[in-house]
Amino acid sequence: MTQAWVILTGQDGTDISAPTDKQLAAVLAEVFGKSRKGASSHPEPATATLRFGYDDGLMYLAEVSSTGELCFEEWSDRDCEMALAQPRRMKAGKKEALEIWTMLAHRQVSRIRELDWF
């Protein structure tokens, strides 16, 4: 039987399995908080990633940057061996990023595909 999983990787590299909506919001607050602290103390933008997938197949990934970039990717497996579509990108604030992460955590991939990507 195929097992689904969701993993949140915070900007510090810490993984959280099956994150709650509260944990998603907290990690995004950290990521977007970094952009306000100044470029001198953090030359690289902070990022965090939410991944949803199945043990024996598909994986979806939504990475958020403190610069407001959001990237959504679809892969054939957890090892990112074959991309199933071109990465989709958009500008997103904390609120929009939380909405997309919440959809992904609730396995609503088709709703994410329907968004306005560039």
Image (cartoon, helix red, strand yellow):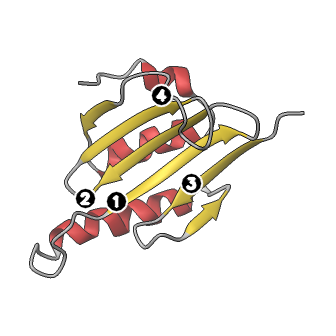
In what element is the residue under mark 2?
loop
The residues tagged by marks 1 and 3 sit, at their Cα atoms, a distance apart of 18 Å
Q: Amino acid at mark 2?
A: Ser
State which tag comes first along the sequence, 3 or 2.
Answer: 3
In the drawing, what numbered circle is on residue 66?
2
Give me the residue at 54% from left, 63% from top.
23
Q: Nearer the viewer, residue 56 or 25?
A: 56
In the drawing, what numbered circle is on residue 47?
1
Give me the residue at 43% from left, 40% from top.
99
Vertical placement of residue 58 versus 41, above or below: above
In what element is the residue under mark 3?
helix
For the N terminus, the quadrant is: top right
Q: Quadrant of residue 52?
A: top right
The residues tagged by marks 1 and 4 sit, at their Cα atoms, a distance apart of 21 Å
Image-based side of 86 in relation to 105, left or right:
left
Image-based side of 20 in relation to 5, left or right:
left
Q: Amino acid at mark 1?
A: Thr
Residue most extreme to the bottom: 41
Vertical placement of residue 42 versus 32, above or below: below
Q: Is there a contact, CB below 8 Å, between mark 1 and mark 4?
A: no
Counting from the top left corner in percent of width and height, residue 35 is at 19, 66
The residues tagged by marks 3 and 2 sit, at their Cα atoms, a distance apart of 19 Å
Counting from the top left corner in percent of width and height, residue 114 is at 41, 17
Q: Nearer the viewer, mark 2 or mark 4?
A: 4
The residues tagged by marks 2 and 4 sit, at their Cα atoms, a distance apart of 25 Å
In the drawing, what numbered circle is on residue 21?
3
Counting from the top left corner in percent of width and height, residue 26 is at 45, 66
Q: Which residue is mark 4?
A: 83
